[in-house]
Image (spheres, rainbow, N blue to C red):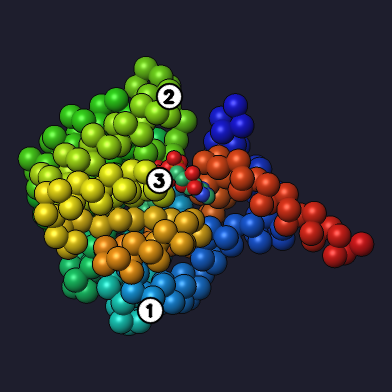
Amino acid sequence: MLRRGLLWLSERQRVFDFVRRNRLARGVARRFVAGETVEEGVGVACEVVATGIAVTLDLLGESVADAPTARSACEGYLELLNRMANAGIAVNVSLKLTQMGLDIGEDLCDENMTRILDRASEVDGFVRLDMEGSDYTQRTLDFFAHRLHPRYGNRVGVVIQSALRRSAEDVDRLIRLGARVRLCKGAYLEPPSIAFPDKRDVDQNFVTLMERLLLEGTYPAIATHDATIINRARALAGQHGLAEDRFEFQMLYGVRRDLQTSLRSEGYRMRVYIPFGTQWYPYLMRRLAERPGNLVFMAGNIIREGLSRS
Ligand SMILES: Cc1cc2nc3c(=O)[nH]c(=O)nc-3n(C[C@H](O)[C@H](O)[C@H](O)COP(=O)(O)OP(=O)(O)OC[C@H]3O[C@@H](n4cnc5c(N)ncnc54)[C@H](O)[C@@H]3O)c2cc1C
């Protein structure tokens, strides 16, 4: 119920306009978001890289409704690629196709993606297409398989959500294509007709898909903070003698830093997803929806701030 409410709120622009002006909410966002500017995003990325953990940077934005905004998001990514290359860190970014104009037109989206992927090729970078709500699953996979992967190969990758019933078939197709897949549980509210309503089924499906990707996929990314699932991945890798460079773990900035560090020190490849930018509200709401404890954290901050003022 709480999760549904928070996910509903995540799509309300008016609430965002209000929240963005609120200093406390901005403070809470800083736990999960590395700031609002490209300097701040790349600065945090450099600090993480210095600890031996790899990064992917996300210039936040989604559901763009006009061409100038989509082009400006594209310019933002071009600047981000340049800044990462100049900072001397491996260039790796994550983006959403609706941010690049998918809702306005596939050709506009293609034009923006071509500019980004051409530049990524010049700086030996990698671009991951984040997966959005289920209205976009087929369109994202088609765009990836028909427009981007044939031209850019594994310089571009995609995401699969274990919450969706269709994902086993999608994983099969992507394995046949030799594509790079990030596997996650899925952050969006979906109807039971297409998604597993019971979290245990989402977790079980994650394990099933993860096993397929680890054994037959191309450098899969296991994106979860779920310690039980991570242990399954480690056990499977050990059982099948999979070298550490055949896959990577991924986690979100601000979540389970302890686990990030311990996996890294055990020799596993670990990548942290670092979002930044002014459009942080929907992202923050999805993180709050995942874990009620985060709301307690937010309430604690507000109370502390209130007490220190009185
Ligand atoms: C690198 C990365 C990329 C992602 N990309 C996408 C994407 O493209 N599309 C998409 O739909 N989703 C994406 N997600 C989000 C994902 O779908 C889940 O919503 C999110 O990761 C929580 O699921 P979990 O696997 O960690 O498992 P859960 O079962 O939700 O959580 C397991 C444990 O992790 C910890 N935890 C999880 N979330 C939080 C949190 N917000 N705050 C504090 N602790 C937490 C808690 O200890 C919890 O008990 C991504 C996640 C990661 C890590």
**Which residue is at the front of the view, 110 or 89?**
89
Is 196 displayed left or right of 91 in the figure? right
Residue 289 pos. (x, y %): 55, 40
* Residue 301 figure quarter: bottom right
Between tags 3 and 1, which lies in front?
Answer: 3
Q: Where is 290 relative to 61, above or below? A: above
In the image, what residue type sits under mark 3? Asp
Q: Which residue is mark 2?
A: 198
Between tags 2 and 3, which lies in front?
Answer: 3
- Whether residue 124 appears in this view of the structure is yes
Q: Quadrant of the N terminus?
A: top right
Q: Indicate which disc residue 50 carries.
A: 1
Q: Earlier in the sequence, mark 3 or mark 1?
A: 1
* Residue 28 figure quarter: bottom right
Tag 2–tag 3 contact (CB < 8 Å): no
- Residue at 37 percent across and 17 percent down: it is 193
Residue 279 pos. (x, y %): 53, 55
| Mark 3 Cβ inside 8 Å of ligand 1 | yes
Separation of residues labelled 3 and 1 (CA atoms)? 25 Å
**Which residue is at the front of the view, 238 or 10?**
238
Q: Which residue reaches farthest top? A: 193
Q: Earlier in the sequence, mark 1 or mark 2?
A: 1
Q: Which residue is mark 3?
A: 226
